[in-house]
Amino acid sequence: MTRHMKWWGWGDEAVSFDHHDKPALAPFVKQAIGIDLDAPPLPLIDLNALSIPRPSLPDHFADVLRAAVGPEHVHTTPLERIVHAYGKSLRDLVRVRSNDLGRIPDVVVYPASEAEVATVLSAALETDAVLIPFGGGTNIVGSLESAADEHRPVVSLDLARMDRVRSIDAASGLAVIAAGALGPDIETQLHAQGFTLGHFPDSFTHSTLGGWIATRSSGMQSDLYGDIAQITKAVRVVTPRGTLVTRSVPASSTGPSVREMVLGSEGRLGVITEATVQVHRLPAQRKILGYFFPDWDRGIAAMTAIAASDAAPSVTRVSDPNETGFSLATRKAGSAVDRVTSRLLRAYLQRAKRFDLSALCLSFIGFEGSPEHVKRQRSLVGSIVSAHGGVCVGSSPGTLYDQKKFDTPYIRDYLLDRGAFADVSETATTWSNLRPLYDAVTAAANTAFAEVGVHGYLMCHLAHSYHSGACLYFTFAFRPGDDGAPLTQYDTVKHAIQQAFIDAGGTLSHHHAVGREHAEWLADDLSAPGVEFIAALFEGVDPGRNLNPGAIIGSDRSPEVTPSPAPGT
Amino acid sequence: MTRHMKWWGWGDEAVSFDHHDKPALAPFVKQAIGIDLDAPPLPLIDLNALSIPRPSLPDHFADVLRAAVGPEHVHTTPLERIVHAYGKSLRDLVRVRSNDLGRIPDVVVYPASEAEVATVLSAALETDAVLIPFGGGTNIVGSLESAADEHRPVVSLDLARMDRVRSIDAASGLAVIAAGALGPDIETQLHAQGFTLGHFPDSFTHSTLGGWIATRSSGMQSDLYGDIAQITKAVRVVTPRGTLVTRSVPASSTGPSVREMVLGSEGRLGVITEATVQVHRLPAQRKILGYFFPDWDRGIAAMTAIAASDAAPSVTRVSDPNETGFSLATRKAGSAVDRVTSRLLRAYLQRAKRFDLSALCLSFIGFEGSPEHVKRQRSLVGSIVSAHGGVCVGSSPGTLYDQKKFDTPYIRDYLLDRGAFADVSETATTWSNLRPLYDAVTAAANTAFAEVGVHGYLMCHLAHSYHSGACLYFTFAFRPGDDGAPLTQYDTVKHAIQQAFIDAGGTLSHHHAVGREHAEWLADDLSAPGVEFIAALFEGVDPGRNLNPGAIIGSDRSPEVTPSPAPGT
């Protein structure tokens, strides 16, 4: 009925990655993590072989749900329940493929309107059921699953039927959009009227507006368009206290921002049904140019200088040498002209610029606006790049990157099909702390690889520049060894990287959220009183813990916030 | 010991407004609101004639406070208690000048460090006292006063001794600044190292960083530097749950933003002691140019177009015809050359451009950055201004505006000294709703003036442009009539304007906060569940209501949030 991703992996069933047209990739992967891409994939468990418990759904509650949204929009089939059980993290895929389904939802409900959402929430509170709002299901930090010992009925509330751009206020650059709309739904509807949202997270093709808001998402063009926190100007949320409606005003001093309380709330406060978001006229021109820097330090320094300058690019991104190597290895076999150009460029880089090719860092910088604006931005950025020893390599690599930017999760699955674990961890920190943090993470990951006894690969890029800092996005991969459960090995590496973020002054996540995966670092990140602030909000709004309990703040917390008499110093 | 503003009015005792060098002002004021500026001022009540109740301060508590900060930093003198009793709204000045002091604080405490703040808060909680954090005391919405029937000891905690820029991270454009630092303290310390904060609210000379954060302040250059909500990257807050410390990261997806919970919290969650804020290199060039538009609609349309363009000015501001008339009336008697230039310009505007001088709208637009950047921005903006029938009148009016921008409160007091009430109300709304909202406010104010039976004057400017809208800043003035108490007449007008904001789709305040003055509109602005969210936070963090109770959410709320079983739709 509605679109679903593969139950065992990312994306459309009809789409998968293939390495055969990328001649450099198999040798690269073989050397990096010891996986043979030409070997046949591992067998996949059959859907019918999964152990699906019978749904625990009181008859009366099921009747109320069917009456609320129509019986054809209430599902208890194994497939529906499985695709709503988890998000799409490496851990999620490993578990579902090994028949470790956890506490899957008892029922999946598809409301068509805010009124239906309110009726379902009301019924869930009445019955003391758990309700987990579900957008595209792309979350990779465990925001969508129930506690293993949850004894109450669990409802997954899928917003897929609420997918319309409802109105556009062209003069104000605002659109009212239903929360269940997927990225492509939104852009298609906006493009028809000459607008864009400008929000392109890696999950774009399969994630929703409501999901972006609930997790404080950020897109690749955030430098120009802002993170979803800036893009979202007003929200409508069905909560246990009634329907929250904030006003669409550009700024306000009405106490602590309620809109900001909803951003990042991961379903703990209610169900986001609609948002008013900033939209922009489609730019007259849009360019993403490729650059090479001689090394990582100079790449970081150039991004730092661009952020402090009068330039305003739409995208800033630079990969470390390891990620640059990976990117170059994923190039398709090109035409003869391409190959010659590429050879000439490498020769130029190596001789004229005396680049050490193993230290090379690939960068993409984007520009949007009128042709004059783009030209001036390119010139401002070009001067800064040159001053840091970088060279522009034109628009072909940028165009290719732009076309392929949403493919990475398919590559992750392709590796998993062949026995390799690949995952991501990202953080943000100040410009002055970027390199120390990067070094700390690198050291921590390498120590963890050694501890686990695997041949691991770590790579990173800097993206999402702000005035005071940027995001560092790490990807790590390895083939689990025979010592210990594969997920335990994964946990060791993932844990080491996250702990390094915290120890070295980063945040636990720049845009992937907290979920259950990152919850253990929340107090380190926000300090204990910060967690108390969030807990006070959640417990005041949802005292029965019916809304996605366990996300952000673990369900092992004591039911009441206990006052601490003396403030610390 | 520490600087205080006049107990009866705004600003330094040594400074006051004088109209005698502004020949057009007295006739203007006479015509607008029937006040004779040449008449002698009304007599002012003597400080010693005020009825000051004895402080209600248990001995043990006083001893603990003296031990915490040193006896010389604990004050119970009438002057100290009076200057900490109110902010500086028109209502505050009318009350203090008429010996209506309300529930003034029992003691004023000046801590020198976060540790001392923590000790004071701890003692206040132990004793069940009320604690009201105090920055510069410039608030105009009643954020600083106690409930009339408050029976607990009331402590005003003045952060004046915590005024240092503690460190600057030049590479990241960040500074760590103590919360009690005044605007000029901050800029002087930053300038010495080549930086600026770029935050210049009208209260700049007498307001503090902590106060700006606690009220979600906005400065005149917010178009470029952002509101204080964007400028503030991390906070330290002494709370009943311990000391909250958020990380200085450019962005994060760590659940609902705790930093945003502190912004606008008006002392309800704790005492802000320090913040990490964005700072910028002093721009190579800074220009504020004056423009005239033929009428208000074209002025608004030009600002709308600038916001949608590639241009990035630092200041955008346009006055309606009434405010333009007032601005022109406050010009000093100039040199012969000035007068000739001015006459020639008026002749040009009237003949060549066929401007109706009574519809004329004065505008200021600012530019900052490298000379090339400023030149390009001026050119981009100039084209848009021309396309909307506007003309540039050079840098002299802008320079004058820039010099005089902090003088307005002194004019307000000068009028009050002569029996006239003048006050401000400001809001924000979308570009498409600016003119309808303006018309609704104008109609509401005029109806209220008629109802009260006074000859009132209302004027407005648009400022603080965002992608989706802007702030409308209204000033109203009248001489209270003989029917009814003067403050009741004031309330009628102020209430009508605020109600029009809400009815016409604005927010109750863009940057003056909620306090006690705007609290009655909070549920209209945020919806009832929005108020419940904020209440849940306050009550969870400060269940004893020791921290500035009554600000933002009235103290007449029931002590517990009662769950509403069924969500509305």
Image (cartoon, coloured by chain):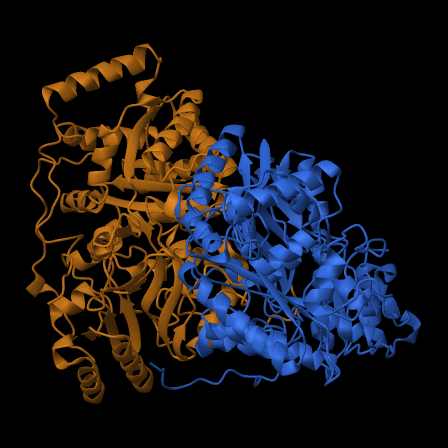
Chain colours: A orange, B blue
**Left or right of A407 on screen, residue B550:** right
Taking depth in this image into account, of B188 and B488 the one nearest to the observer is B488
Residue B166 in the image: x percent, y percent? 68, 44
- Identify the image quadrant of the C terminus of chain B: bottom left
Q: Which residue reaches farthest top?
A: A351
Residue A523 in the image: x percent, y percent? 49, 58
Taking depth in this image into account, of B90 and A562 the one nearest to the observer is B90
Q: Which quarter of the picture shows residue A138?
A: bottom left
Name the residue rendered at 18%, 59% in the picture: A96
**Left or right of B132 on screen, residue A315:** left
- Identify the image quadrant of the N terminus of chain B: bottom right
Residue A366 in the image: x percent, y percent? 33, 36
Q: Which residue reaches farthest bottom?
A: A60
Q: Which residue reaches farthest front?
A: B351
**Left or right of B268 on screen, residue A159:** left
Q: Which quarter of the picture shows residue B18?
A: bottom right
Residue B560 in the image: x percent, y percent? 54, 83
Q: Let me know if residue B170 appears in the view.
A: yes
Q: Let me know if residue B64 appears in the view.
A: no
